[in-house]
Amino acid sequence: MMRRTCLVLVVAGALAAGGTTVPSFSQESEPQAAAALAITMVRVDPVQPSVDTLCRLKVEIENSDERIATQLGFTVTINGAKLPVYENHLFMFPLSPEAKTELPLYNFWSTETSRPEPASGKLEIVVTLREARWMNIAMEGDTETWTPLGDVAGLPVSYSITVPMGKGDG
């Protein structure tokens, strides 16, 4: 009985205020700025790793801004499992302005105790650039100085690839 009374009072209040529509609780948000950094390629070598194969991972990032970007934080997943080595690591590679840069990331094993051979015979790899900073890098005498200019907006950005597993010895 209490619920009906509350509902009647809410509806009566809305009608008394001249409202006949249900109030909307959605808010318009400003569109998120497009990131000036984009992952344009992810490469795994070998291209068809076998079980227990050490794989090399590289990523290409395009910096469309006029500033240098660095302090790159990545998340890498393989078949949905995060590689923990990336959790607390920032790569201090400077990404040149208005250029593409290829970066080596950490090697990984195609299979591990916690990540056995996939039933699909494929490795689904997702590389996410989750954070980065703009940086002014200049020489002051014989000393190179790095001055932070702020966080790169529009992150995270991701790129995914599917790598077929090969047969035989890696």
Image (cartoon, helix red, strand yellow):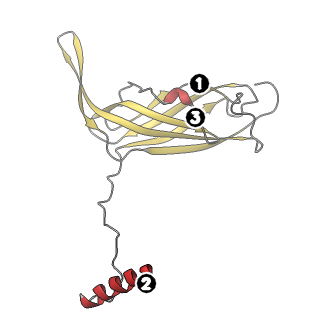
Q: SS of the residue at dot 2? A: helix
Q: Is residue 167 left or right of residue 130?
A: right
State the separation of the CA atoms marked 3 and 1: 11 Å
User: Helix, strand or loop at disc 3?
Assistant: strand
Image position, residue 13 (x, y; %): 28, 85
Residue 16's place in the image compared with 6, above or below, is: below
Q: Quadrant of residue 21?
A: bottom left
What residue is pinned by disc 2? 4
44 shown above or below 64? above
Callout 1 amino acid: Asn
The C terminus, quarter of image: top right
SS for callout 1: loop
Label 3: which residue? 43
Which of 109 and 113 lies nearest the eye of the viewer? 113
Image coords of residue 106 (percent x, y) = 54, 25
Res 107 label: 1
Name the amino acid, label 2: Arg
Position in image of residue 100 (x %, y %): 41, 36
